[in-house]
Amino acid sequence: MGILDQITGKAIAQQVTEYSEIYGEILIGLHRDVEHLRDDVDRAQQALARAEQKIERLDQQPPAWTGSTTRCAARSSRRLPSSRAWPGAWRARRPNWFPFAPPSPD
């Protein structure tokens, strides 16, 4: 940079051009990122709309399990061993279920 460049403003013009190019590239990159994010949001909104439509369709259908099946399932759940029971205890009571049943904890 000579004195002549400072007087004519050429050095300042070069710096402005350099900064303009750098920040222009940054802004273009940010614009691309924003466009990609918009596309992602649009896809998410479409997926949400499809899920809401599916929920509405499922709500309009009659339940698959009603009546005696529900009562039978409730009775079966009462017969399940408690969480404090030995995990393999029910297998020991059914020796034909698995040929190598673990010994009973009794």
Image (cartoon, rainbow, N blue to C red):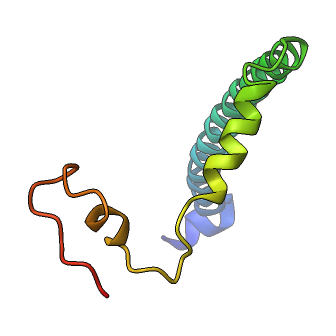
Residue 27 in picture, x, y percent from top left = 67, 45
Quarter assignment of residue 88: bottom left
Would you place residue 71 above or below residue 104 in this image? Answer: above
Residue 32 in picture, x, y percent from top left = 62, 35
Q: Residue at x 65, y 45 (%)?
A: 30
Would you place residue 30 above or below residue 8 in this image? Answer: above
Q: Is residue 17 left or right of residue 50?
A: left
Q: Is residue 89 left or right of residue 76?
A: left
Residue 69 in picture, x, y percent from top left = 70, 28
Q: Is residue 42 left or right of residue 56?
A: left
Would you place residue 55 above or below residue 104 in this image? Answer: above
Q: Residue at x 38, y 80 (%)?
A: 86
Q: Residue at x 37, y 74 (%)?
A: 87
What residue occupies the far left of the structure in this picture?
A: 100
* Total marks in image: 0
Q: Nearer the viewer, residue 64 or 91?
A: 91
